[in-house]
Amino acid sequence: MTTLKAQSVLVTGANKGIGLELVKQLINSSVPPTQTLATFWQSSSTQELETLANDHSSVRMIELDVTDSASIQRAVERVEAVLGSTGLNLLINNAGINSHATLENITAEDMMAVYQTNVVGPLLVSQAFLPLLKKAAQALDMEEMSCKKAAIVNITSLLGSITLSQKNFRRAAMYPYRLSKAALNMASTCLSEDLKQYQILSVAIHPGWVQTDMGGKEALVSVSDSVSNLMKLFANLSQCDTGKFLDLEGGELPW
Ligand SMILES: NC(=O)c1ccc[n+]([C@@H]2O[C@H](COP(=O)([O-])OP(=O)(O)OC[C@H]3O[C@@H](n4cnc5c(N)ncnc54)[C@H](OP(=O)(O)O)[C@@H]3O)[C@@H](O)[C@H]2O)c1
């Protein structure tokens, strides 16, 4: 099996769910990153992540609220201090919120809150960490695009697929969440076009319907299965994947 081999990985929303499991599987992989930057925000319960950070010196906890520009900037400064001149290889925009609002009860506040966290957040985080991603890409100048070199992975959802909404809308209307993930998909594609010139890859990946606080107990995929598939996928992403919307097996999803 191919392994990721990225020297540094930053995961947003790493105190629970998919983000926390990503940190666990990164540090237990056969070639673990030298630095795993695990971010949490003010409201987080961080006990499990703190235990991991205490037991593994490669795990650094960094405060980062994706809805707060000042918090993003402080996180960049802390990460820069940790990584020095090496740059950041892989940024995983994982933090997200959902909302079950329907047409009957949707509000502007609800729409804006979800949009702020799921779209504006990942875009501004990507913008802020771009200098560090560029550094990493330059350091591995001769290599093809990959997550080992420099990449942005946006954790999106199947519910953001406009094409598939004709099939799955009745099961989960979720207007704010669907609209936000469709916009995140567009952001991911725009980033891929913009960042090709720097050899930085950008993809949008649906992690499956996962048993987390967000996905619920009835979800189809365990968090450990979802993340072990994500890890394999990250390891295999290459030049030809940039700009795509992928499922857990690396298959292309319709926009
Ligand atoms: N679970 C699924 O079935 C599923 C399916 C498709 C896509 N996804 C996507 O996968 C990603 C992870 O979801 P999950 O299932 O692991 O959900 P989760 O268990 O609810 O975790 C979400 C994470 O995002 C963090 N977060 C929320 N708002 C934040 C903010 N303003 N700044 C920084 N971090 C913030 C949360 O921190 P707190 O705990 O402190 O709030 C938590 O760490 C999300 O983007 C989600 O949309 C999930």
Image (spheres, grey):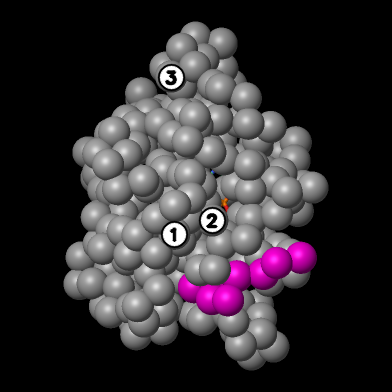
Distance from disc 1 to disc 3, alpha carbons, whole Å, reads 32 Å
With 187 as the anchor, is 230 left or right in this view? right
Name the residue type under label 1. Leu
Q: Quadrant of residue 77?
A: bottom left
Estimate the x, y position of residue 254 in percent, counting from the top left: 49, 17
Q: Amino acid at mark 3?
A: Trp
Of pointers 1 and 3, the one earlier in the residue sequence: 1
Depth order, front residue of 51/202: 202
Q: Nearer the viewer, residue 119 or 188?
A: 188
Image height check: is 135 above or below 46?
A: above
Measure the C-alpha gap from mark 2 to mark 1. 9 Å
- Mark 3 lies on a secondary structure that is loop
| Quadrant of res 138 | bottom left
Residue type indicated by callout 2? Lys
Q: Is residue 206 visible?
A: yes
Circle 3 is placed at which residue position?
255
**Which dot marks residue 148?**
2
Q: Residue under label 1, please give it.
A: 140
Please tell me whether mark 1 sits on a helix, a strand or a loop. loop
Q: Is residue 158 above or below residue 20?
A: above
Mark 1, other Cα within 10 Å: few <14 / some 14–19 / many ≥20 = some
For label 2, count other residues whose C-alpha is less than 10 Å away and answer few (under 14), some (14-19) or many (20+).
many
**Among the two numbered marks 2 and 1 on one chain, the one whose residue lies closer to the N terminus:** 1
Residue at 56% over, 22% down:
252
Look at the numbered discs 1 and 3 and tell me whether their residues touch, using CB distance below 8 Å. Answer: no
Tag 2 near tag 1, CB within 8 Å:
yes
The residue sitting at 23% across, 72% down in the picture is 73
Magenta region: 30-38
Q: Earlier in the sequence, mark 2 or mark 3?
A: 2
